[in-house]
Image (cartoon, rainbow, N blue to C red):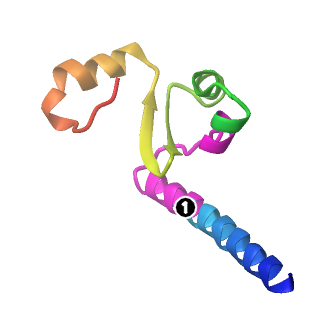
Amino acid sequence: MTTVAAVLVTLVSLFYGWLLYSDWVARTEFAKRKLKYVKLGNAFKALYLREQVHLTKTEAVKREGPVFGFSYLNKYTVMVADADIVQTILVKSFTDFANRRV
């Protein structure tokens, strides 16, 4: 029984270390681009606690401002909540921005 517990503790520790490393990588990537990094709720909360992700983003926009970055399932995303900036990205500078999600 102790080997099972040791393996379980090792796996949980490795998973927690991976989460910390992923957060550190996201922070450094957004810092390189001079964007604020906001840590939003994770996928586990959204799935198991039925936390509504769009409400979390709305609260972050109110708290952090119209432009910030976040990582969700290891996908780096820039949140733009200002209509003028969105128009610039989607219309005027369309070819300069790749992989836009609306």
Q: Residue visible at 13% across and 32% down?
A: 95
* Label 1 secondary element: helix
As drawn, the residue found furthest toward the right would be 2
**87 lies left or right of 36:** left
**56 lies left or right of 3:** left
Residue 76 makes an appearance in the image: yes
As drawn, the residue found furthest toward the top would be 83
Q: Which of the image's four quarters has the C terminus?
A: top left
Residue 15 drawn above or below residue 39:
below
Q: Residue visible at 64% across and 66% down?
A: 15
Residue 28 drawn above or below residue 88:
below
As drawn, the residue found furthest toward the front would be 1
Q: Amino acid at mark 1?
A: Ser
Residue 96 rendering spot, x and y as whole percentages = 17, 36
Q: Which of the image's four quarters has the N terminus?
A: bottom right
Magenta segment boundaries in residue numbering: 23-46
